[in-house]
Amino acid sequence: MNKIQIKLKIAERNYPLTIEATDEELVRKIAKVLNEKFVYYKNQYSSADAQDTMAMAAIDAVTTLSKSLDTMPAEVEQQMKHLEKLLA
């Protein structure tokens, strides 16, 4: 397995991650979704701090993913669970 180090900016903070090279595109897409949801909740609840806003964004994202897991093949589901652990 080929591990790589990447840096992601999520919710206005930088996160260094070591991931499988084959997961990079997926991890970056998930970070993009989290950032979009973060901005949405930041605009909706301007009085919330960044941690609360990120929690709302994460719950929203995981809820959406969970709903779609029933229709995903087992391999994709396993990859999504792996990414959820990386982001936890």
Image (cartoon, rainbow, N blue to C red):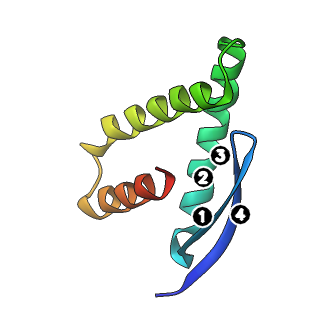
* Residue situated furthest bottom in the rendering: 1
Whichever of callouts 1 and 4 sits on the residue coming sooner in the sequence is 4
Q: Residues within 10 Å of mark 1 (few under 14, many from 20)?
A: few
Q: Nearer the viewer, mark 4 or mark 3?
A: 4
Residue bearing mark 4 = 7
Depicted 50 relative to depicted 8: above or below = above
Residue bearing mark 1 = 25
Contact? badges 2 and 4 (CB < 8 Å): no
Query: Separation of disc 3 and disc 1 at Cα?
Result: 11 Å
Depicted 1 relative to depicted 87: above or below = below
Expressed as whole percent of the image width and height from the top left, the position of residue 81 reads 35, 55
Whichever of callouts 4 and 3 sits on the residue coming sooner in the sequence is 4
Residue bearing mark 2 = 29
Contact? badges 1 and 2 (CB < 8 Å): yes
Q: Nearer the viewer, mark 1 or mark 4?
A: 4
Secondary element type, mark 4: strand
Q: Which mark is residue 32?
A: 3
Depicted 56 relative to depicted 25: above or below = above
